[in-house]
Amino acid sequence: MRKLLMLISFTTLLTVVGVSAEELDQDLMQTIEDTNKSLSSNIALQRVDASVTDAKELNNMFDIVEAHFIKKGDAANAVDLSKKSKDLSQDIIKLVNEKNFDSATSTATELSRTCKSCHTFYKKE
């Protein structure tokens, strides 16, 4: 299972690297959204391994988002929000490993809000 998840993450990375600086791959954004929902569910169910896997995948995907906005330029806010999202993902890993699910839930909520705040400025309908 772990190898499959690594393969999927690597494939996603290869797919998104070819995306132009003008538009961020919508499949990636949908994957982030789906993984974020999975993370919230896994935290609520106190599934340590699944929560850590989701948070690590999100962290990797936020690396891609950050690189996209750095390349795009004139999007410092999006770069900062991507960095914040990576930090929150890493915090969630730590909290879940400590079995501090209440704090992990709060941090996951903050992560969702961070995503939404970026969408306010950068998401194209």
Image (spheres, rainbow, N blue to C red):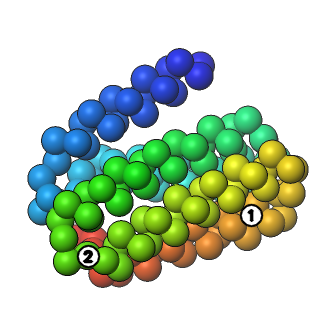
Q: Position of residue 55 (x, y in %)?
A: 60, 48
With respect to residue 42, does 74 lie above or below? below
- Left or right, 116 with reference to 124: right
Image quadrant where one finds the C terminus: bottom left
In front of the other: 87 or 43? 87
Q: Is residue 120 visible?
A: yes
Tell which circle, 2 or 1, labels the residue nearer the N-terminal end: 2
Amino acid type, label 2: Ala
| SS of the residue under disc 1 | helix
CA distance separating discs 2 and 1: 29 Å
Residue at x-position 75% and y-position 52%? 94
Residue count near mark 2 (Cα–Cα under 10 Å), binned few <14, some 14–19, many ≥20: some
Amino acid type, label 1: Thr
Image quadrant where one finds the N terminus: top right
With respect to residue 13, does 109 lie above or below? below
Residue at x-position 30% and y-position 47%? 27
Depth check, mark 2 against mark 1: the one in front is: 2
Q: Position of residue 42 (x, y in %)?
A: 71, 47
| SS of the residue under disc 2 | loop
Q: Position of residue 99 (x, y in %)?
A: 87, 50
Residue holding disc 2 = 75
In front of the other: 53 or 42? 53
Residue at x-position 42% and y-position 73%? 80
The numbered dot on residue 105 is 1
